[in-house]
Structures are given as structure tokens and as C-alpha cells.
Amino acid sequence: MKALINEPKKKNGQKTKLQALLAKISRAEIESKLNVECIRNDFDRELWKKFDASKKLQKDIEALNNSTEYGSDEIGIYQWIRMSYTLPDELQNDTEGHDSLDRYMAEQWLHYDRDSNALFLYQGETIVINKDGDIFLVDQPGSGEVIIGHDEYKDEEKRNKLIEKWMEDQGYFPGVFTEDNYGNVFHVKTQIKVNK
């Protein structure tokens, strides 16, 4: 096929018949992809109206924002819920419906996992307290810089004060988390309670 593509042009500068046909194939492939994309956008627009109107789906999104369930994976720490919402029956076994729901959620910075019917909200950059007590600013798992060493504090109250001071000094307030030996992730409240 490569020899056909490199077939020399005719002497008068016109393309050979094979070059012209290859150009037509290329244009047709591009037009086909654009047509599919336009139809997919129409599909999304229609389905997203149903998503916006679904009280069950909107309730799931609200529940995610209030969830106290956390986990971590290769992307980072996330909040999650098991969704009660399911796609309409005619779309249950259709990849396009699930892909559209994923695109809808991505527009809201959320991630939909079809296999587990779960909704995730990744936390972005976080402060993580490891099992040794070192405190890291982490932007992705396995990375990060120690911001407070385990030898800088003796108890939780002092640790929390140091974390709060670091955040105030930086003017930046990411979520604070710890993970146990089993991979369970827990949100850590560092603010000092004020008794009234």
C-alpha cells in the first residue's frame, strides 16, 4: 500500500487516480467522525435534560458532596457513594448511555464508574498523614513533600495545630486525610473546637 501512496504525480502536476481515491477515503473518514460526533452531541443534549430533571440523580450528586466515605486509587483520594440512580431501561445495556452519564458527571468534576455503579469526587491535592506520622502535601499517590515531620509533635492536638498553621501560612486549605494499614481512608478534622 505504501508504494501506492508514493506513486508519482502525473507530469502536468495532477494527482494520479490512486492518490485522488486515497484523498477521498481520508475526507470520508473525517466526515464520518464529525457526523458521529454531531449525533453524539444531540444524544447527550437530550439525555442530559433527563439527568437534570431526575430527582434521584440530583439527590445522588448531593449525597456525594456530603459523603463521609473516602477511598484512594492511582489517581488520588476521593469521596464516593453507591448510586441509587440507574439509566432508563432502554439504555441499561447500551454503552452510549453509560458514556453519556460519564460525560455528564465529568462536566461537574465527578466520575461515574459503571461497573460498581458508584460516583466519585476526587479531592485533588491533599494533606496526608502516613502511618509513621509524617505529614505530606500530596498531588498524586506516591508523591509529595514532607511538610511536618513526625518528630515535630507529640500528640494529635499539637499535630493539628501545626497543620492548621501550615495552611494559614500558605493561604491554602486542602483536605487532610490518613490511611490505615488496610487502605481505608479517613478524613481528619484539624480545626480546634471552640467552646462557647
Image (spheres, rainbow, N blue to C red):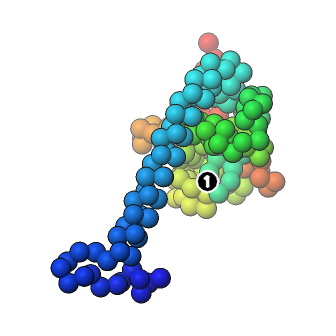
Q: Position of residue 119 (x, y in %)?
A: 69, 37
Q: Nearer the viewer, residue 141 or 130?
A: 141
* Residue positioned most to the top: 196
Q: Residue 193, can we see it?
A: no
Q: Nearer the viewer, residue 52 or 139?
A: 52
In the rendered view, does 77 fall on the left or right side of 31?
right
Residue 15 vs 116, above or below: the answer is below
Dot 1 falls on a residue whose secondary structure is loop
Q: Say whether residue 27 is left or right of residue 12.
A: right
The residue indicated by pointer 1 is: 75
Residue 26 appears in which quarter of the rendering? Answer: bottom left
Crowdedness of circle 1 by 10 Å Cα count: few (<14), some, many (20+)? Answer: few
In this rendered view, identify the residue nearer to me: 1 or 57: 1
At 61% from the left edge and 38% from the top edge, which residue is drawn?
A: 100
- The x and y percentages for residue 51 are 63, 25
Q: How many marks?
A: 1
Q: Say if 20 sits above or below 35 in the image.
A: below
**Residue 180 locus on image (x, y percent):** 77, 51
Place of residue 151 in the rendered image (x, y in percent of width and height, measured from the top left): 62, 56
Question: In the rendered view, would you say 165 is above or below 182?
Answer: above
- Residue 91 is drawn in which quadrant? top right
Q: Which residue occupies 65% across, 57% down?
A: 74
Question: Between 166 and 145, which is closer to the camera in this rendering?
Answer: 145
Query: The disc labelled 1 sits on which kind of residue?
Result: Ile
Which residue: 61% across, 53% down?
Answer: 75
